[in-house]
Image (cartoon, grey):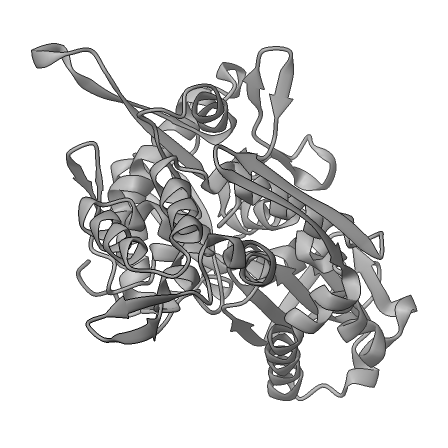
Amino acid sequence: MSKPAPVRALGLDFGTTNTVAALTDPTAPGGARSIRFPDGDDVHTVFRSALDFWPEGRGRDRRIAVEAGPWAIRHFVENPEGSRFLQSFKTFAASPSFRSTNVHGRSYRFEDLLATFLGKVADHTDPAEGALPRRLIAGRPVAYAGAAPDPALAEARYDTAFTAAGFEEIHYVHEPVAAAFWFAQGLTRDATVLVADFGGGTSDFSVVRFTAGADGVRAHPLAQSGVGIAGDGFDYRIIDKVVSPKLGKHSRYRSWDKWLDVPAHWFTNFARWNQLAVMKSPETLRELEKLAASADDPTGLGRLIEMIEDDLGWPLYKAVSEAKAALSSAEEAHLAFHHGTIHIDATVRRTDFESWIADDLARIDEAIEAAITASGVPPREIDKVFLTGGTSFVPAVRRLFVSRFGEDRIETGEQLLSIAYGLALIGAEEDIERWTVRETVRAA
């Protein structure tokens, strides 16, 4: 009796910063491979989670054009005037307060943004891939980012977007569990593994017990935990300490006969990339202009307005991310950002950066402890610690694990690909329900 053909599935790691898609492929090393996105002489396997909208034509012929990923970035950098650039919109997924955002006169809900993004991902997929599977295994964080997140609402929104994109069978898997599944393919003996997945918006942890037998490696998830702090949060600390003071933070404004502090929420919102899109509204800009007119630092607040009006989230994000990355291998880094009237040149020292993220590190450490405690496995009995995601390169983050487990038990892998690969492999499992999670879905 012939064996049934292996199930084809698409593993989708839709991230705050980057998106990776992978296919089950028995002919590929490990049984999965990433989808390719040709771009001239280049081929991408990592697709930036970004959208750029701009108007084309006039009158009745006017339409709104859109691009995604590296194509969106390229268009925005070359044509910033009139563009509406959105990134990190995954952060809105579980937010009940986010209803929609206005893009050139049209209202987009989160599910509209995601469906638009997925459509462009499909457009840029290498034609040689052929028709993509209708079975989708999508990663989801253990804990969503944002204040008072609603996981069921996020799942309902995802369902709507994925269905609109043409997927017929939709499953969700915790992202660190998918990373663990991929990592386990190389195990030759039983092992208990702690997987730490650091994304742009969340940090998730799973303890998984793997057993190696004649039928391959089997996995038994023991515990998960997560926290809505990750790479973007670390970027925020640099923005808050280095950039925001140049944009009017700590300034005051006159209200009648009193001097009041400019509300801190302007800088909290501004420093989180996903909020720039929301702030670019006539009402917000009018309120900021009113504050600037009566402020003791009108020039600084004017720079803040310029940041918002000129959609400077991407170039600022790039400058901050480059400085943060440099601190992973150097004791200090130069942060430079210049645009119009905005000129920032600063030296960021690793010791200062680590003091700024101290509270974030403490919350991450609490989440690690929660996963270990819930698993019932003493730290000495955890055989391997698998770190994935760019933030795992931050020395202070790595030290959290070295101090608990020692350097010899820590391993890293495909930093940006492991989750998507694991999702694709789970999609081919006969007992897929063992790995998937479902919320009590509510209407979006």
Please tell me whether residue 77 is drawn above or below residue 364 in the rendered image.
Answer: above
Q: Residue furthest left?
A: 60
Please tell me whether residue 398 is drawn above or below residue 52 in the rendered image.
Answer: below
Residue 216: give x, y in percent of width and height: 72, 56
Please tell me whether residue 357 is drawn above or below residue 183 in the rendered image.
Answer: below
- Name the image quarter holding residue 147: bottom left
Res 6 seen here = no
Asked if residue 264 lies left or right of residue 41, the reply is left
Number of marks drawn = 0
Residue 281: give x, y in percent of width and height: 23, 45
Image quarter where the C terminus lies is bottom left
Q: Residue furthest front?
A: 257
Res 60 seen here = yes
Asked if residue 41 lies left or right of residue 424, the reply is right
Q: Nearer the viewer, residue 6 or 20?
A: 20
Residue 369: give x, y in percent of width and height: 66, 84
Image quarter where the N terminus lies is top right
Asked if residue 115 lies left or right of residue 225, the reply is left
Residue 189: give x, y in percent of width and height: 83, 65
Residue found 39% across the figure and 40% down from its top: 306
Residue found 27% across the figure and 46% down from its top: 111
Q: Nearer the viewer, residue 65 or 193?
A: 65
- Name the image quarter holding residue 133: top left
